[in-house]
Structures are given as C-alpha cells and as structure tokens.
Amino acid sequence: MSYFQAIVIGLIQGVTELFPVSSLGHSVLLAGWLGWDSLLHGQAADESFYLAFLVGLHVATAIALLVFFWRDWVAIIRGFFTSLRTRRIETAHQRMAWLLVLGTIPVAVVGLVFEHSLRTLFAKPLAAAIFLTINGLILLLGERLRRRPAPATAARDTTTPHIETLSYGDGAIVGTSQIGALFAGISRSGITMTTGLLRGLDHDEAARFSFLLATPIIFAAGVYKLPDLAGPLGNGIRGQVVVGSLCAGVAAYLSVRFLTRYFHNRTLYPFAVYCLVAGVISIIHFA
C-alpha cells in the first residue's frame, strides 16, 4: 500500500463513515474503480493487511466522534454509573446511556459472530454496488414513510419526541438496524437515521442518535482488531496507518460538524439519489 492510497482511503473513510453512503461499500468500490487489485483482494482475505489498515482508520473516526460529542459523553457516562448506583433512571442523560446500551448490544453480538464471514462473502465490487443501490432505496423510502406530527399540532415543539424520551423498545430497534451495515454498501448512519425517522425522531435528532450509537461500535471494533497491527499483518503498513488515520480523523470531525448542521433543516434525499446513481453505474460497470 502506498502513502497516496493511504491518504485517499483515509479521507474517503472519514467522510463516508458518517455520511449515509457506506464507508465499507466505498472502500470496496473505490479499489475496484481505481484498479487497486491488491487492496481489493486484501479486503476479502481471511488474513488481511487491508483490514488491519482499516482498523486504524476506524479508531481515528471514533476518536473524532468522541472529541466532537465529548460533553455529551461525559454526561452520558456519568449518568450510566449514577443510575447503577441509585438503581433509578431519572435524568435525560441516564436514559440516553441505557438507550445506547440497548442499541449497541445486538449489533455487537451479531458483528462478533458474522462480521468476518459477511466481509469475505460480500466485500466485492458487484455486491457492494448492489447493496449501495439498496441503501439508496432505504433512504428514499425512509423519507417517504417517516412518521410526521399531525397537521393540527405540527407547529408545537412537543409533537416531535426528543431522543431522551424515545422508548427503550424504539431505541433497541434503531440500534439493531446497525446490523445492516455489516453488508458492504449499507450505511450504518443511513440505516439508523432512517429507522429513527420511522420511530418519530426528526432529522437532527436522528442524526445525533445515529452518531452517538456509532461511536462505541466503531471504537470497539477498531480496538478489538488493533493487535493485528502489532503482528505480521502490520508489517510494511504502519506508517501508512498513521497517515491514513490522521486523514480519516480530520475528515470525520469535519463531516460530523457539517452533518449536525445540515440535518437541522434538510433531508436524506440527496444522499438517496447519490447512492442510487452511483450504485446503478457501478452495477453496470462491474457486472
């Protein structure tokens, strides 16, 4: 892997991990479109130097999310431990802590068991293109079907539920939807945002909940695989990991800063159109 490839993939990873367009799908499609066959083969290998490289990028992305939402995380972690001590859930941050726990457990278990087999089976350009197209359809249908306030009360702020008042069942449903992101081409943020919209959240709340949900999963997945970089799989790419991770971290921070503002008054439609167009063109190219 060259340093140029590390920079390009790092920047793409940092952006597409948070934009609802699938980072895993783009890492597969990018290698296919640019003819980087060694990276493409490495993506689906049982013992992959490319996967070891992506581990560093995931950790950098998670750190960027932690930095951006550090105030939220301090309050959430404090709320988690105080709720354990008092055996009560009384504050918004205590409730958010348990929403995140319930939303994280299903994808953590499924990912631990099936992530490797799904990656080796579907981390191929044609499959990623198909799933990217499906991702576009998910975003499109989510916008069309999302739950809206009744017209007579739409002007009232209380009609749109805040994340902290989301039911535990709905929180678990939103978190469980992350399982779809194990397929290259399905976006973690896209599918969780769409599910959040269907459960009654508005766009900026759905985006914030999506980013908070993603942080522990991305970070844990990276740390779990991090020892690979210290072994043979890290030989010859450790410098590239550092450079790529720096690029991914900066790109992720700028992306989440942009998206939290974007979703105050905008929708998923532009991302749906992009995924449909890019997916269909890629299907034609790789078929």
Image: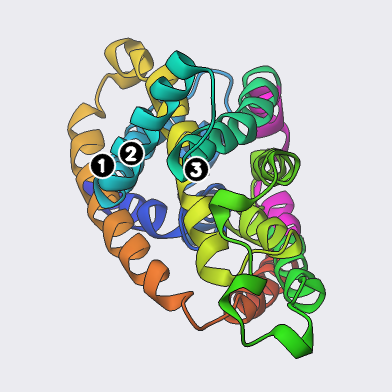
Q: Is residue 114 left or right of residue 213?
A: right
For label 2, the SS is helix
Q: Are marks 3 and 2 in contact (CB under 8 Å)?
A: no
- Tell whether position 123 is magenta: yes
In percent of the image, x 66 and y 38: which residue is there? 182
Rendered position, 146 above or below 92: below
Q: Which mark is residue 75?
A: 2
In percent of the image, x 36 and y 53: which residue is there? 14
Query: Which of these two is toward me, 39 or 171?
Result: 171
Mark 2 → mark 1, Cα distance in angstroms: 27 Å
Mark 3 — residue? Answer: 214
Eye-nearest disc, 3 or 2 = 2
- Given the image, on which type of amino acid does mark 2 rest? Ala
Residue 184 position in % (x across, y down): 64, 46
Query: Which of these two is toward me, 174 or 113?
Result: 174
- Given the image, on which type of amino acid does mark 3 rest? Ala
Rendered position, 101 above or below 126: above
For label 3, the SS is helix
